[in-house]
Amino acid sequence: MKKFVCVHGHFYQPPRENPWTGEVDEEPSAAPFHDWNERIAKECYDANTRAPILNAKGEATTFVNNFELLSYDIGPTLLSWLKRKSPVTYRAILQADKDSAASNHGHGNAMAQVYNHIILPLAKKRDKITQIYWGVADFEYHYGRKPEGMWLSEAAVDRESLRVMAEHGILYTVLAPHQAKRVRKLGFARRWESLRHESVDTRRSYRILLEGGKLFHIFFYNAPISRAIAFNGLLYNGDQLAHQLMNAYGHQDTKQLVSTATDGETFGHHHHFGEMAVAYGLKKIQNHQLARVTNFADFLEHTGSRWEVDIYEKSSWSCAHGVERWRADCGCRMNHEAGWNQKWRAVLREAFDWLQGEVDGVFETQGGDLLKDPWLARNEYVRVMLDPSDRERKRFLSRNAKRALSVEDELKVWRLMEAQKFSLFMYTSCGWFFDDISGIEPAQVMKFALRAIELVQPDVKKELEPAFSRILAQAKSNIPEMGTGKDVFERFVKSAKAPSVIASPEGAKQSR
C-alpha cells in the first residue's frame, strides 16, 4: 500500500475549573447544559466514541469509535475532566489508542499535548520544559505508554520548543504548511529551496536538525482539505470527505500521506453530526482498501524522512502575524465590529509577566530552603496533580525535600507548588484568543492569577493584588459598561472565590 490517510483531531478545552472549588462553575451560555465542557462532551467527545453509520433508510447499521481511525491529541486537563465526569467516554478513548496500536505496528493514534495550552514561543525555557514534562507525564499516566508525537498549542513553534520536546523523547509534531520556510532533499551539497506560502509538499515527512545535533520530525497537514473540513461544509457528506482525501495524492509512484488537522470539536460540536461523516468516509476508504488509514508515527516508520525542513520561528496555525495574537493588537480576531481593538492583550500579558516574576521569586527563595531543586520539583509535581493521595505526596517529598519537613513546612511546599501551577495556568492561550477582556476566557485566566497571588501572599511583605490591579486598569474593554481589566477583575473574578480554601492539586478547562 503506497497511499496513507491521516485525519487529525486536536481535542482541547481550556482549564475551566474554579481554582477555589476544583469544579466548573455554571456557564449560562452553555444551556441547557451546566457548562461548556458538558455540552461539548455530549456533542463531540461522547459522540465520536459511538458514531453511527446509516443505511439508505436512515437506520444505524453499525457504530464506530472514531478514535480508532483518527490521529488525535486530547488536552491533559480535558482528559482528566473526562475521567471524572464521563468515564465511559474516557475508557473508550484509551481503548481506541490500544486498538489502533495493535493495527499500526505498535503506533497508537494518540499524541501528547502541551499541558495547559500555553504559547510556548512566548514562554521562558524553564516553563517550556515544565509544560512538555507535564504533557509527557500526563500522557503516560492515562495511556500507559510513552508518547511519540506532541501537539503544540495553536501549532505555535520555535526551535527551542522543538529541542525541549526532542530531549523529552518526542519524535514529531504537526504544523501548518505556511510554517515551512525552506526544504532540501538529503544528500551531499543539496541546496535549500525557498518556499512560497503553503507550497511545501505535505505528502511526505520531514526532519529538522536542531542545536546540539538533536533530530526531530515534522509533518505538515493539507491546508485546503483541512479548511474545507473546518469551515466549508466538507463534513456534511462522508462520501465527499473520502473523495477529497483520495484526490489529494500526486502521480509519483512513492508512499504518500494525505493528512488533515483541525480542532477535534469540528467533529460534532462545530458541525453537528460531523462525527458521522468522519466514520463513514474513513470506513469507506478502509473497507474498499483505497488507502491505509493510519497515524503519523506509523507513516514515519514506513518511510522515514528523506527531506530536511526549516521553519518560520515564532509562527502558529491561527495567527497571520506569528504569535502576536497572544500579546498584541495584531488584527487577528473573531468579531470585526467597527471601533474594536485588542490593545488589552498586551496589558494582560504585562500583568501576568509581572505576577509570574513575583511568584517565581518567592518560589526560588522560600522553595529553595525546603527543596533540593525547586524547578525540578515543579516538574515532578504533575504526579501529585494526577494523584493527590497521601502516598504520592510522601513520594514527592521523599524525592525532593532537603530534609524531613515539619507540618508547617509541608503546607508551605504545597502552597508554593499550587502557586506555580496556577501561574502557568494563567497563560492558557484562550485568555488572549478572542476579542474582549470581558470575555469568560480572560476572566478565567485572571482567576488563576488571583489564586496564585493568594497562595504566595503569606510569604511576601508587599501586597500583590493592588499592584496587579493597577496594571489591569490600563486595559480598556471594547464594551463601555465593562470598563477596564481592573473592573472585570473586581466584578467577575473576585466574586468567584470560595469562603474557605484548601490547596488542592487539581487541574482545570473552556470553548473553541
Image (cartoon, grey):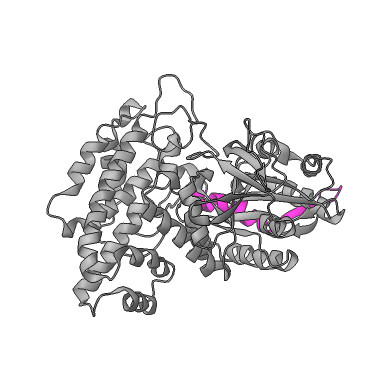
Question: Where is residue 439 shown, x and y percent of the image?
Answer: 40, 38
Question: Where is residue 352 shown, x and y percent of the image?
Answer: 30, 44
Give the residue displayed 55% in from the left and 62% down from the top.
86
Res. 24 in view? no
Q: Residue furthest front?
A: 189
The quarter of the displayed image where residue 376 is located:
bottom left
Numbered disc total:
0
Question: Where is residue 248 shown, x and y percent of the image?
Answer: 78, 40
Q: Residue furthest left?
A: 461
Q: Which residue lies furthest to the top in this view?
A: 338
Give the residue displayed 69% in from the left and 50% down from the top.
306
Which of the two residues, 403 or 355, is positioned nearer the viewer here?
Answer: 403
Res. 471 in view? yes
Give the residue displayed 42% in from the left and 69% down from the top.
383
Question: Where is residue 360 shown, x and y percent of the image?
Answer: 26, 55
Q: Where, quadrant-wise, is the N terminus in this rendering? A: bottom right
* Residue 404 drawn above or below residue 498: below
Give the left or right position of residue 406, taking residue 320 as reference: left
Give the left or right position of residue 351, taking residue 384 as reference: left
Q: Give the range drawn in magenta.
A: 33-58
* Residue 227 drawn above or below residue 371: above
* Residue 176 drawn above or below residue 14: above
Residue 216 painted magenta: no
